[in-house]
Amino acid sequence: MLNNPFQNALDQLQKAASYLEKDSFSKLEILKNPEKVIEVTFPITMDDGSVRIFEGYRVQFNSARGPYKGGIRFHPQVSMDEVKALAFWMMMKCAVVNLPLGGGKGGVTVDPKQLSEKELERLSRGYMKAIARDVGPLVDVPAPDVNTNPQIMAWMVDEYRKFKNQNSKIKIDKKNEGPEVLAMITGKPVNKGGSEGRTEATGMGGMFTLQAVLKKLSLSSSAHFSAASKVADSATGSSKIGANAPRQLIVAVQGFGNVGFFVAKLLSEKGFKVVAVSDSKGGVYVKQGIDVEKTLECKKKNGHLEGCYCKEGACDLAFGKRITNQELLELPVDILIPSALENQITKENAPKIQAKIILEMANGPTTPEADEILHKRGIIVIPDILANAGGVTVSYFEWYQNRNNQRWSKDKVNQKLKEVMNESVDSVWAESQKHRIPLRTAAFILATKRILSKIK
């Protein structure tokens, strides 16, 4: 398989391994293989009465630090290797932000856009029924991912409750589910046990991470970071380049789903200029800066981004132009944010990247070969296992609230999230400066040390 995501993950681990103590090498082999791999097939009755068989996966990679934790995605490209890689990265991600959780991931090979709402519900319930014996609040805690959302999580919680009632002497009332059911999945609707701030958490965490790194860069005189150290002021999104006056930092976002929308919206509100966004069908470029919320409204109305050239509250074909996803990645911007799928930045297009900083909001968007090229060119990559960890962090908050019968305000959630992301940037940055290495390798070293310390 070209650019096998799981092999990419192992290559990233191997790069970090050379910086570990020699007595860790034997334990390191444990992290190269998942503890449990679940592959299921399950039937779904379609609206026309026909029956289709779907393939699903759940990979439980490592539980040394706590219950497995990771999302469920519905996508036609879902495969075992992809899910193994995502579970591996979740293991690393939870350790980077120091959560008492392990790594897991799940998915179904399906194009959910081809399903009706009823078919989507049957699919969601069918998948949960198939894996119900292998998940639970102290075992494995799923969450939303690509093409899944709070409503899907709510259907899955209800299906899990049914499973528990069928296999337990103690019946669980739907109106009083308690932590043994509510805490088995996160990303639920707020009125069904979900946490305030969870919907925008990944984007919010990405913004906090970028701000923290920009602050580090503005204070750093290190030659290792010299190519990107021109990018400064984390609070306003302005940058002083040489003797020039401060200007807005320019941003392009690949992937205009939940994560891409929120990171674009939040950065715009902080003074960054978002000039391009895209989805699976292509993107739009507005040099003067996109009105992010208006662009989303236009996309929902039209069903696609084409023609959604929106700025300052209005949309007009004269404002911008259509671009491909490839063209977006190569735009002359300060910050590039891949928020779609893995393997988007490769050895073929890495030489053409013009951004000074890449904030990885997708999982595995940069191949190891591309990483080498970007590093040699002085481009800072803020790795996925740090950059997009806001989602799993607030998922942990939700899990904690469910288990302890608590309800936190959005302000409290966001404040705690900011603290976690800032502390994590500090730790990764320190490791990077210590060894004079890229942030990704530093994050892997930090995570690996934390995981291995829990393995007896």
Image (cartoon, rainbow, N blue to C red):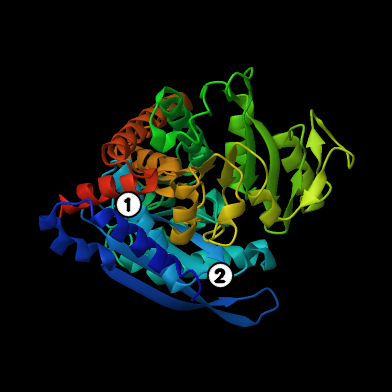
Whether 369 is drawn above or below 232: the answer is: below
Find numbered disc 2 in the image and state the secondary structure of the residue it sits on.
Answer: loop
Q: Residue at x 35, y 48 (%)?
A: 93
Between 3 and 456, the one nearer to me in the picture: 3
Q: Which residue is drawn at 59% across and 80% down?
A: 52
Residue beneath label 2, please? Answer: 77
Whether 47 is drawn above or below 354: the answer is: below
Q: Which of marks 2 and 1 is nearer the N terminus?
A: 2
Q: Residues within 10 Å of mark 1 (few under 14, many from 20)?
A: many
Q: Which residue is drawn at 77% across and 32% down?
A: 288
| Tag 2 near tag 1, CB within 8 Å | no
Between 415 and 425, the one nearer to me in the picture: 425
Residue 1 locus on image (x, y percent): 48, 76
Between 410 and 100, the one nearer to me in the picture: 100
Residue beneath label 1, please? Answer: 92
Q: What residue type is labelled 1?
A: Met
Residue 128 visible? The answer is: no
Numbered-mark total: 2
Residue 208 visible? The answer is: yes
